[in-house]
Amino acid sequence: MKTIKIFTLIAIAIVGFAFTVQQKKAGPWEVPAEYKSMENPIADDQASIKKGKMVYMKHCRSCHGNQGLGDGPKAARLKTFPGDFSSAEFHAQKDGEILYKSIIGRDEMPNYEKKIPSKKDRWAVVNYMRSFKK
Amino acid sequence: MNTKYISKRDKYSFLSIFLPCLLILTFIIGMSIPTLAQEDEFANEPVSGTFESGLLGETQTTETPYAGEFGLHIQHRFGLIENGLEDVFGIYSTSNIRMGIDYGVTEKFMIGYGYTKEFKLQEFHGKYRVFTQTESNSIPVSVALYGNLAINSQDKVVFGNDYTFSDRLAYFSQIIVAHKFNDNISLQLAPSFTHFNKTDSLVEHDKFAISLAGRAKVTPSMSVFFEYDQPLNIDDMREYESDDNDPEANLSFGIEIGTSTHVFQVFMSNYEGITPQRNALYNKNKISDGDFLVGFNILVRF
């Protein structure tokens, strides 16, 4: 009787773990043409990178992590992997595309139009994220 | 024989605060004229992030919640630190608390409701951002108007004889002028007017005050801030000859941590009233006597 109880418990544990939700990779994200063709008006100088870092640390770090590897403290609770910002795939995008995804967002990625209202700040974050390139 | 009681001390304290404030204001405007090298595209964009939120220590700032955004405030003031470890520097002593909620009706206009524990004050307040400083300093300062109505909701026996409802009301109005020097440093000046319909015996009904506050960022998410509030005990406005019940000035200083969804402020202060009109008229804690207390403010944005 005791062995059956232990066996049942182990079986439940194995089945339980099999149903653990794995974080899935983000699907394709179509960016509107107007953002693809947008030029970054802010030079990626020290000042804008410093500013971008300030904004990133405040709003983005908690999910995307300090190095943009998608390993921030809140990342584990997300259903979709937040992305690896050091990858070649990420940096192949134009500045306008990164801006759109960062500010407009979708699904679990919030919209930051209100929280980062300044256009200067938005482009500064894009400049800062370029520094994550491996 | 009626001798007019003239207080030289008060005359000097008024001037000694007013003149430096005027000097600082002129300095700010003068500094803004040689503009920094800004991209022309952003020259007329309003600056953002002058302050982390609409509340800094004891004073309101020129910021409001975004349109459609709520802010939940929890403000807590512990007891005075005077008893040392006996009550853990006032932390285990009596306290005052306010819980409030603010709502950004539009980008420029905010309304809010709060409830302060001491004197059971039901507060209704609003703030209007008249204009915001621009990146190129073509508008050198941000200006906001703030108004607060507090209704003392204690039992009517507290108000003595001849009670009427209007005895419960107290008003506070303020003009807030702020300047963002750069991403790290901001300063603001805010004169105010307080009026209580009914006050304690020998306490004035009206009080002008002026507040100076500033913050300096030390890391991307943390800043240090200070605030100095000076009630202006103007002789020509005196109802009573004695200055025994004149309110005392306040000095607050502490740290602030801002994240995307929260703002935390922990500081030392002389003010225990939380509600601004209470502080402006009734503060008895003296800076020179070391009558400080620990306080914290938590803001949750949603």
Image (tube, coloured by chain):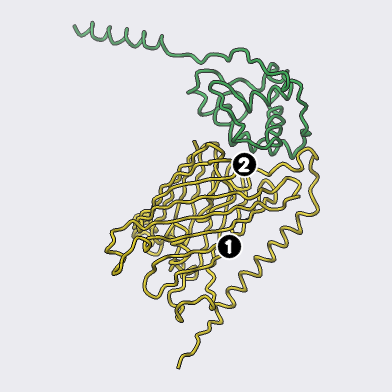
Q: Position of residue B8 (x, y in %)?
A: 56, 82
**Residue found at the very far left of the displayed protein:** A1
Q: In the figure, is residue B81 to the left or right of B7?
A: left
Residue type pointed to by label 1: Pro
How packed mark 2 is, by other alpha carbons closer than 10 Å (few <14, some 14-19, many 20 or more), is some
Q: What chain letter is assigned to the residue under label 1?
A: B
Residue that mark 1 sits on: B191
Q: Position of residue B222 (x, y in %)?
A: 57, 45
Residue found 26% across the figure and 10% down from its top:
A6
Q: Position of residue B229 (x, y in %)?
A: 54, 63
Cα–Cα span, label 1 and label 2? 30 Å
Residue found 23% across the figure and 9% down from its top:
A5
Q: Which mark is residue B220?
A: 2
Q: Which element carries disc 2, helix, strand or loop?
A: loop
Q: Are marks 1 and 2 on the same chain?
A: yes
Q: In the figure, is residue B86 to the left or right of B186?
A: left
Q: Position of residue A49 (x, y in %)?
A: 71, 35
Image colour assigned to chain A: green
The answer to whether A96 is drawn above or below residue B182 in the figure is: above
